Amino acid sequence: MQARQKLAASRRWVIKIGSALLTDNGRGVNREAISRWAAEMAGLREAGIEVLLVSSGAVAAGMDRLGWRRRPESIHQLQAAAAVGQSHLVQVYEQAFGHFGCPTAQILLDHDDLSNRTRYLNARSTLRTLLSLGAVPIVNENDTVVTDEIRFGDNDTLAALVANLVEADALLILTDADGLFTEDPRDNPAATLIHEASAADPSLAAMAGGSRSGLGRGGMSTKVRAAQLAARSGAATVIAGGAVDGVIRRVCAGEQLGTLLQPDADPMTARKRWLAGQLQLRGSLFLDPGAERALRDQGKSLLAVGVTGVEGRFHRGELVACRNGAGEEVARGLVNYDSAEVARIVGQPSERFAELLGYRDDDELIHRDNLILQGR
Ligand SMILES: Nc1ncnc2c1ncn2[C@@H]1O[C@H](COP(=O)(O)OP(=O)(O)O)[C@@H](O)[C@H]1O
Ligand SMILES: N[C@@H](CCC(=O)OP(=O)(O)O)C(=O)O
Protein backbone atom coordinates (compact mmCIF):
# COMPACT_ATOMS: atom_id res chain seq x y z
CA MET A 1 0.00 0.00 0.00
CA GLN A 2 1.22 3.51 -0.78
CA ALA A 3 2.44 5.38 2.29
CA ARG A 4 -0.22 8.08 2.04
CA GLN A 5 -3.01 5.54 1.57
CA LYS A 6 -1.79 3.74 4.66
CA LEU A 7 -1.94 7.03 6.51
CA ALA A 8 -5.55 7.44 5.46
CA ALA A 9 -6.32 4.21 7.32
CA SER A 10 -5.14 5.73 10.64
CA ARG A 11 -7.79 5.53 13.36
CA ARG A 12 -6.08 7.63 16.02
CA TRP A 13 -4.37 10.95 15.30
CA VAL A 14 -2.46 13.35 17.50
CA ILE A 15 -2.64 16.82 15.95
CA LYS A 16 -0.28 19.53 17.16
CA ILE A 17 -0.83 23.21 16.43
CA GLY A 18 1.98 25.71 17.01
CA SER A 19 1.90 29.17 18.62
CA ALA A 20 2.54 31.28 15.52
CA LEU A 21 -0.43 29.70 13.74
CA LEU A 22 -2.78 29.87 16.70
CA THR A 23 -2.11 33.49 17.41
CA ASP A 24 -1.73 34.66 13.82
CA ASN A 25 1.89 35.56 14.52
CA GLY A 26 1.18 37.09 17.90
CA ARG A 27 -1.92 39.05 16.92
CA GLY A 28 -4.20 37.41 19.50
CA VAL A 29 -5.96 34.06 19.37
CA ASN A 30 -7.00 33.35 15.79
CA ARG A 31 -10.65 32.37 16.35
CA GLU A 32 -11.39 32.02 12.69
CA ALA A 33 -8.57 29.53 12.09
CA ILE A 34 -9.49 27.61 15.24
CA SER A 35 -13.11 27.35 14.02
CA ARG A 36 -11.89 25.90 10.71
CA TRP A 37 -9.58 23.36 12.34
CA ALA A 38 -12.28 22.42 14.87
CA ALA A 39 -14.76 21.80 12.03
CA GLU A 40 -12.26 19.51 10.31
CA MET A 41 -11.42 17.64 13.52
CA ALA A 42 -15.13 17.24 14.34
CA GLY A 43 -15.53 15.78 10.83
CA LEU A 44 -12.86 13.19 11.63
CA ARG A 45 -14.62 12.33 14.88
CA GLU A 46 -17.85 11.82 13.01
CA ALA A 47 -16.05 9.42 10.69
CA GLY A 48 -15.01 7.40 13.77
CA ILE A 49 -11.43 8.65 13.81
CA GLU A 50 -10.08 9.58 17.24
CA VAL A 51 -8.39 12.95 17.55
CA LEU A 52 -6.19 14.25 20.30
CA LEU A 53 -5.08 17.86 20.04
CA VAL A 54 -1.80 19.21 21.40
CA SER A 55 -2.12 22.95 21.39
CA SER A 56 0.60 25.50 22.02
CA GLY A 57 -0.16 29.18 22.20
CA ALA A 58 -0.76 29.72 25.92
CA VAL A 59 2.21 32.05 26.38
CA ALA A 60 1.55 33.86 23.09
CA ALA A 61 -2.16 34.28 23.88
CA GLY A 62 -1.35 35.45 27.41
CA MET A 63 1.15 38.00 26.12
CA ASP A 64 -1.55 39.40 23.89
CA ARG A 65 -4.11 39.55 26.73
CA LEU A 66 -1.60 41.28 28.99
CA GLY A 67 -0.53 43.72 26.28
CA TRP A 68 3.08 42.49 26.22
CA ARG A 69 4.87 42.97 22.92
CA ARG A 70 7.95 40.82 23.57
CA ARG A 71 8.26 37.32 25.02
CA PRO A 72 9.47 37.85 28.62
CA GLU A 73 12.70 36.29 29.84
CA SER A 74 11.68 35.59 33.42
CA ILE A 75 10.21 32.18 34.07
CA HIS A 76 7.55 33.59 36.42
CA GLN A 77 6.37 36.06 33.83
CA LEU A 78 6.24 33.30 31.23
CA GLN A 79 4.26 31.14 33.64
CA ALA A 80 1.88 34.01 34.41
CA ALA A 81 1.36 34.64 30.70
CA ALA A 82 0.74 30.92 30.13
CA ALA A 83 -1.90 30.87 32.90
CA VAL A 84 -3.74 33.85 31.42
CA GLY A 85 -3.45 32.54 27.87
CA GLN A 86 -4.37 28.92 28.57
CA SER A 87 -7.78 29.69 30.03
CA HIS A 88 -8.54 31.95 27.09
CA LEU A 89 -7.40 29.33 24.58
CA VAL A 90 -9.48 26.50 26.02
CA GLN A 91 -12.52 28.73 26.11
CA VAL A 92 -12.10 29.44 22.38
CA TYR A 93 -11.66 25.72 21.66
CA GLU A 94 -14.66 24.76 23.79
CA GLN A 95 -16.81 27.19 21.84
CA ALA A 96 -15.45 26.13 18.45
CA PHE A 97 -15.94 22.40 19.08
CA GLY A 98 -19.26 23.09 20.82
CA HIS A 99 -20.78 24.06 17.44
CA PHE A 100 -20.37 20.43 16.44
CA GLY A 101 -21.63 18.97 19.71
CA CYS A 102 -18.09 17.78 20.43
CA PRO A 103 -16.97 18.04 24.09
CA THR A 104 -13.39 19.13 24.79
CA ALA A 105 -11.20 18.27 27.78
CA GLN A 106 -8.22 20.26 29.02
CA ILE A 107 -5.18 18.13 29.89
CA LEU A 108 -2.07 19.81 31.25
CA LEU A 109 0.94 17.52 31.55
CA ASP A 110 4.42 17.81 32.96
CA HIS A 111 7.40 15.54 32.55
CA ASP A 112 6.69 13.61 35.77
CA ASP A 113 3.32 12.60 34.39
CA LEU A 114 5.04 10.66 31.64
CA SER A 115 8.13 9.37 33.45
CA ASN A 116 6.40 8.16 36.64
CA ARG A 117 4.84 4.78 35.86
CA THR A 118 1.67 5.21 37.86
CA ARG A 119 0.97 8.64 36.48
CA TYR A 120 1.86 7.43 32.98
CA LEU A 121 -0.75 4.71 33.23
CA ASN A 122 -3.31 7.09 34.69
CA ALA A 123 -2.74 9.66 31.96
CA ARG A 124 -3.03 6.92 29.35
CA SER A 125 -6.27 5.55 30.81
CA THR A 126 -7.84 9.00 31.13
CA LEU A 127 -6.94 9.98 27.57
CA ARG A 128 -8.22 6.69 26.18
CA THR A 129 -11.43 7.08 28.18
CA LEU A 130 -11.94 10.60 26.86
CA LEU A 131 -11.42 9.37 23.30
CA SER A 132 -13.90 6.55 23.78
CA LEU A 133 -16.43 9.10 25.05
CA GLY A 134 -16.09 11.09 21.84
CA ALA A 135 -14.34 14.03 23.54
CA VAL A 136 -11.36 15.83 22.06
CA PRO A 137 -8.56 16.09 24.65
CA ILE A 138 -6.66 19.38 24.34
CA VAL A 139 -3.19 18.88 25.73
CA ASN A 140 -0.54 21.44 26.64
CA GLU A 141 2.42 21.48 28.93
CA ASN A 142 1.52 22.52 32.47
CA ASP A 143 3.50 25.73 32.01
CA THR A 144 2.48 27.36 35.29
CA VAL A 145 4.10 24.74 37.50
CA VAL A 146 6.96 23.27 35.50
CA THR A 147 10.46 24.33 36.32
CA ASP A 148 13.38 24.32 33.92
CA GLU A 149 14.53 20.81 34.73
CA ILE A 150 11.22 19.16 34.01
CA ARG A 151 10.10 21.07 30.93
CA PHE A 152 9.39 19.09 27.79
CA GLY A 153 10.88 22.20 26.29
CA ASP A 154 8.64 22.37 23.30
CA ASN A 155 5.28 21.05 22.29
CA ASP A 156 6.61 19.10 19.31
CA THR A 157 8.30 16.78 21.80
CA LEU A 158 5.20 16.75 24.01
CA ALA A 159 3.04 15.80 21.01
CA ALA A 160 5.37 12.90 20.15
CA LEU A 161 5.34 11.66 23.76
CA VAL A 162 1.55 11.85 23.74
CA ALA A 163 1.52 9.85 20.48
CA ASN A 164 3.65 7.22 22.28
CA LEU A 165 1.40 7.39 25.34
CA VAL A 166 -1.84 6.68 23.50
CA GLU A 167 -0.15 4.62 20.76
CA ALA A 168 -1.50 6.87 18.05
CA ASP A 169 -1.26 5.72 14.44
CA ALA A 170 -0.10 9.10 13.27
CA LEU A 171 1.01 12.56 14.35
CA LEU A 172 0.20 15.71 12.37
CA ILE A 173 2.27 18.78 13.22
CA LEU A 174 0.74 21.97 11.85
CA THR A 175 3.00 24.96 11.58
CA ASP A 176 3.51 28.15 9.57
CA ALA A 177 5.77 26.48 6.97
CA ASP A 178 4.30 24.06 4.41
CA GLY A 179 6.49 21.22 5.64
CA LEU A 180 10.17 20.43 5.96
CA PHE A 181 12.22 22.13 3.26
CA THR A 182 15.79 21.39 2.26
CA GLU A 183 16.66 24.64 4.12
CA ASP A 184 14.66 27.21 6.08
CA PRO A 185 12.63 28.82 3.25
CA ARG A 186 12.91 32.15 5.07
CA ASP A 187 16.66 32.01 4.48
CA ASN A 188 16.58 30.51 1.01
CA PRO A 189 13.41 30.91 -1.09
CA ALA A 190 14.78 28.32 -3.53
CA ALA A 191 14.62 25.59 -0.86
CA THR A 192 12.39 22.68 -1.90
CA LEU A 193 9.82 20.69 0.06
CA ILE A 194 10.71 17.16 1.21
CA HIS A 195 7.61 15.07 0.42
CA GLU A 196 8.59 11.87 2.15
CA ALA A 197 11.50 10.46 4.14
CA SER A 198 12.33 8.01 6.87
CA ALA A 199 12.03 9.64 10.30
CA ALA A 200 15.39 8.11 11.15
CA ASP A 201 17.18 9.67 8.14
CA PRO A 202 20.18 11.47 9.69
CA SER A 203 20.40 14.03 6.87
CA LEU A 204 17.12 15.66 7.98
CA ALA A 205 18.64 17.24 11.08
CA ALA A 206 21.02 19.30 8.96
CA MET A 207 18.12 20.75 6.93
CA ALA A 208 15.98 21.68 9.93
CA GLY A 209 16.67 24.99 11.61
CA GLY A 210 15.28 26.77 14.67
CA SER A 211 12.29 29.06 15.18
CA ARG A 212 12.39 32.74 14.46
CA SER A 213 8.85 33.78 15.23
CA GLY A 214 9.73 34.68 18.86
CA LEU A 215 6.44 33.00 19.82
CA GLY A 216 7.10 29.31 19.60
CA ARG A 217 10.18 27.50 20.78
CA GLY A 218 10.91 24.56 18.57
CA GLY A 219 11.49 25.45 14.94
CA MET A 220 11.83 22.60 12.45
CA SER A 221 14.56 20.74 14.31
CA THR A 222 12.25 19.77 17.20
CA LYS A 223 9.64 18.63 14.66
CA VAL A 224 12.10 16.26 13.01
CA ARG A 225 13.12 14.96 16.42
CA ALA A 226 9.46 14.58 17.36
CA ALA A 227 8.98 12.39 14.27
CA GLN A 228 11.81 10.16 15.50
CA LEU A 229 10.22 9.91 18.95
CA ALA A 230 6.77 9.18 17.50
CA ALA A 231 8.29 6.44 15.32
CA ARG A 232 9.37 4.55 18.47
CA SER A 233 5.76 3.49 19.00
CA GLY A 234 5.12 3.09 15.28
CA ALA A 235 3.46 6.44 14.50
CA ALA A 236 4.07 8.21 11.19
CA THR A 237 4.44 12.01 11.30
CA VAL A 238 3.26 14.63 8.82
CA ILE A 239 4.54 18.20 9.09
CA ALA A 240 2.23 20.51 7.16
CA GLY A 241 1.13 24.13 6.76
CA GLY A 242 -1.75 24.99 9.08
CA ALA A 243 -2.93 27.79 6.82
CA VAL A 244 -3.49 25.47 3.85
CA ASP A 245 -7.20 25.19 3.09
CA GLY A 246 -8.67 21.97 4.55
CA VAL A 247 -5.24 20.78 5.68
CA ILE A 248 -6.38 18.43 8.47
CA ARG A 249 -9.12 16.80 6.41
CA ARG A 250 -6.86 16.43 3.40
CA VAL A 251 -3.79 15.04 5.19
CA CYS A 252 -5.94 12.57 7.11
CA ALA A 253 -7.56 11.48 3.83
CA GLY A 254 -4.11 10.62 2.48
CA GLU A 255 -3.59 13.60 0.19
CA GLN A 256 0.03 14.42 -0.51
CA LEU A 257 0.48 17.60 1.51
CA GLY A 258 3.48 18.57 3.63
CA THR A 259 6.26 16.18 4.64
CA LEU A 260 5.62 12.57 5.64
CA LEU A 261 8.23 11.10 7.98
CA GLN A 262 7.83 7.37 8.30
CA PRO A 263 8.76 4.90 11.03
CA ASP A 264 11.08 2.10 9.93
CA ALA A 265 9.42 -0.76 11.80
CA ASP A 266 5.81 -1.80 11.26
CA PRO A 267 3.54 -0.26 13.92
CA MET A 268 2.75 -3.43 15.90
CA THR A 269 6.39 -4.48 16.19
CA ALA A 270 7.40 -0.94 17.11
CA ARG A 271 4.69 -0.68 19.78
CA LYS A 272 5.57 -3.95 21.43
CA ARG A 273 9.24 -3.13 21.36
CA TRP A 274 8.42 0.27 22.83
CA LEU A 275 6.35 -1.10 25.69
CA ALA A 276 8.78 -3.90 26.44
CA GLY A 277 11.86 -1.71 26.13
CA GLN A 278 10.43 0.88 28.50
CA LEU A 279 10.36 -1.21 31.60
CA GLN A 280 11.94 -3.91 33.70
CA LEU A 281 9.97 -6.95 34.77
CA ARG A 282 8.93 -6.53 38.40
CA GLY A 283 7.04 -9.72 39.12
CA SER A 284 4.81 -12.51 37.85
CA LEU A 285 1.15 -13.43 37.87
CA PHE A 286 0.26 -17.12 37.55
CA LEU A 287 -2.73 -17.94 35.35
CA ASP A 288 -5.19 -20.79 35.38
CA PRO A 289 -5.77 -22.56 32.01
CA GLY A 290 -8.90 -20.49 31.27
CA ALA A 291 -7.07 -17.20 31.71
CA GLU A 292 -4.18 -18.47 29.58
CA ARG A 293 -6.62 -19.27 26.75
CA ALA A 294 -8.42 -15.93 27.14
CA LEU A 295 -5.15 -14.05 26.68
CA ARG A 296 -3.53 -16.24 24.07
CA ASP A 297 -6.50 -17.12 21.84
CA GLN A 298 -9.22 -14.57 22.53
CA GLY A 299 -7.30 -11.30 22.84
CA LYS A 300 -8.92 -10.58 26.22
CA SER A 301 -7.78 -8.58 29.23
CA LEU A 302 -6.47 -10.38 32.30
CA LEU A 303 -8.99 -10.62 35.15
CA ALA A 304 -8.10 -11.44 38.75
CA VAL A 305 -10.52 -14.36 38.70
CA GLY A 306 -8.16 -16.27 36.39
CA VAL A 307 -5.04 -15.63 38.47
CA THR A 308 -3.90 -18.23 40.99
CA GLY A 309 -0.83 -16.59 42.48
CA VAL A 310 1.52 -13.61 42.50
CA GLU A 311 5.26 -13.28 42.87
CA GLY A 312 7.51 -10.23 43.34
CA ARG A 313 6.88 -6.69 44.58
CA PHE A 314 5.49 -4.17 42.15
CA HIS A 315 3.40 -1.03 41.92
CA ARG A 316 0.49 -0.15 39.70
CA GLY A 317 1.79 0.70 36.24
CA GLU A 318 4.81 -1.60 36.38
CA LEU A 319 5.58 -4.45 34.01
CA VAL A 320 4.81 -8.02 35.12
CA ALA A 321 4.98 -11.41 33.40
CA CYS A 322 1.88 -13.59 33.06
CA ARG A 323 2.87 -17.25 33.46
CA ASN A 324 0.99 -20.51 33.03
CA GLY A 325 0.99 -23.39 35.51
CA ALA A 326 4.31 -24.64 34.07
CA GLY A 327 5.91 -21.25 34.77
CA GLU A 328 6.18 -20.36 31.05
CA GLU A 329 5.68 -16.73 30.12
CA VAL A 330 2.44 -16.32 28.17
CA ALA A 331 2.43 -12.53 28.06
CA ARG A 332 3.67 -9.44 29.85
CA GLY A 333 1.91 -6.20 30.58
CA LEU A 334 1.31 -3.15 32.75
CA VAL A 335 -0.51 -4.13 35.91
CA ASN A 336 -3.34 -2.04 37.37
CA TYR A 337 -2.83 -2.94 41.06
CA ASP A 338 0.12 -3.14 43.48
CA SER A 339 1.45 -6.61 44.39
CA ALA A 340 -0.02 -6.44 47.91
CA GLU A 341 -3.43 -5.65 46.45
CA VAL A 342 -3.15 -8.41 43.87
CA ALA A 343 -2.44 -10.90 46.65
CA ARG A 344 -5.82 -9.96 48.17
CA ILE A 345 -7.85 -10.24 44.98
CA VAL A 346 -6.37 -13.28 43.17
CA GLY A 347 -9.11 -15.69 42.12
CA GLN A 348 -11.82 -13.12 42.85
CA PRO A 349 -14.37 -11.49 40.53
CA SER A 350 -14.01 -7.71 40.14
CA GLU A 351 -17.38 -7.20 41.87
CA ARG A 352 -15.61 -8.15 45.12
CA PHE A 353 -12.71 -5.67 44.74
CA ALA A 354 -14.45 -2.94 46.76
CA GLU A 355 -15.12 -5.30 49.66
CA LEU A 356 -11.59 -6.78 49.59
CA LEU A 357 -9.58 -3.64 48.92
CA GLY A 358 -11.79 -0.90 50.27
CA TYR A 359 -12.13 0.55 46.78
CA ARG A 360 -12.60 -0.56 43.20
CA ASP A 361 -10.53 0.90 40.39
CA ASP A 362 -10.02 -0.96 37.11
CA ASP A 363 -11.96 -4.19 36.53
CA GLU A 364 -8.97 -5.79 34.80
CA LEU A 365 -5.64 -6.69 36.39
CA ILE A 366 -4.04 -5.95 33.01
CA HIS A 367 -5.99 -4.31 30.22
CA ARG A 368 -5.50 -5.96 26.83
CA ASP A 369 -4.22 -2.65 25.40
CA ASN A 370 -1.34 -2.94 27.87
CA LEU A 371 -0.57 -6.63 27.17
CA ILE A 372 2.05 -8.11 24.88
CA LEU A 373 1.62 -11.79 24.04
CA GLN A 374 4.81 -13.83 23.84
CA GLY A 375 5.84 -14.96 20.39
CA ARG A 376 3.51 -12.63 18.49
N1 LIG B 1 14.20 23.26 6.82
C1 LIG B 1 13.15 24.01 7.21
N2 LIG B 1 11.98 23.92 6.54
C2 LIG B 1 10.90 24.65 6.91
N3 LIG B 1 10.92 25.54 7.95
C3 LIG B 1 12.07 25.68 8.65
C4 LIG B 1 13.23 24.91 8.32
N4 LIG B 1 14.19 25.24 9.21
C5 LIG B 1 13.67 26.14 10.06
N5 LIG B 1 12.38 26.42 9.74
C6 LIG B 1 11.56 27.40 10.49
O1 LIG B 1 10.70 26.70 11.38
C7 LIG B 1 9.56 27.53 11.57
C8 LIG B 1 8.44 26.74 12.22
O2 LIG B 1 8.76 26.44 13.57
P1 LIG B 1 8.20 27.28 14.81
O3 LIG B 1 8.39 28.75 14.60
O4 LIG B 1 8.74 26.69 16.06
O5 LIG B 1 6.65 27.00 14.67
P2 LIG B 1 5.56 26.38 15.65
O6 LIG B 1 5.15 27.51 16.54
O7 LIG B 1 4.49 25.98 14.69
O8 LIG B 1 6.16 25.24 16.40
C9 LIG B 1 9.26 28.05 10.20
O9 LIG B 1 8.55 29.25 10.23
C10 LIG B 1 10.66 28.21 9.57
O10 LIG B 1 11.13 29.55 9.64
N1 LIG C 1 3.41 25.38 26.30
C1 LIG C 1 3.82 26.49 25.45
C2 LIG C 1 4.26 25.92 24.13
C3 LIG C 1 5.53 26.47 23.63
C4 LIG C 1 5.88 25.81 22.29
O1 LIG C 1 6.42 24.72 22.21
O2 LIG C 1 5.43 26.45 21.23
P1 LIG C 1 5.50 25.97 19.69
O3 LIG C 1 6.95 25.88 19.27
O4 LIG C 1 4.76 27.04 19.00
O5 LIG C 1 4.79 24.67 19.61
C5 LIG C 1 2.64 27.44 25.23
O6 LIG C 1 1.49 26.99 25.23
O7 LIG C 1 2.87 28.62 25.03
Image: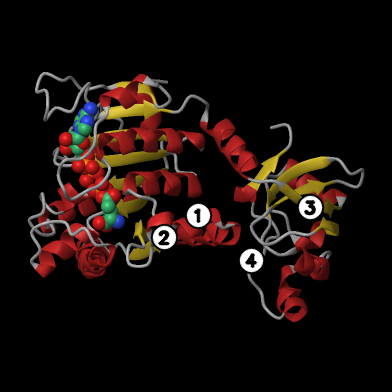
Give the residue type at disc 2: Leu
Look at the image and tell me whether residue 13 can be seen. no
**246 or 160, which is in the foreground?**
160
Q: Does the residue labelled 1 lie within 8 Å of ligand 2?
A: no
Q: Quadrant of the N terminus?
A: top left
What is the C-alpha distance between the residues marked 1 and 3? 22 Å
Residue at x-position 33% and y-position 44%: 156
What is the C-alpha distance between the residues marked 1 and 2? 8 Å
**134 or 93, which is in the foreground?**
93
What is the C-alpha distance between the residues marked 2 and 3? 29 Å
Q: Identify residue for label 3.
A: 283
Q: Identify residue for label 4.
A: 362
Which is closer to the viewer, label 3 or label 4? 3
First along the sequence among labels 2 and 3: 2
285 over 105 or under it: above or below: above
First along the sequence among labels 4 and 1: 1
Residue at x-position 70% and y-position 64%: 337
Q: Is residue 127 left or right of residue 71?
A: right
**Residues tagged 1 and 2 counted as in contact (Cβ below 8 A):** yes
Image coordinates of residue 371 in percent, x first then y, are: 66, 46
Image coordinates of residue 22 in percent, x first then y, are: 17, 52
Q: Identify residue for label 1.
A: 114
First along the sequence among labels 1 and 3: 1
Look at the image and tell me whether residue 373 can be seen. yes
Callout 2: few (<14), some (14-19), or many (20+) C-alpha neighbours within 10 Å?
Answer: many
First along the sequence among labels 1 and 2: 2
Give the residue type at disc 4: Asp
Q: Identify residue for label 2.
A: 109
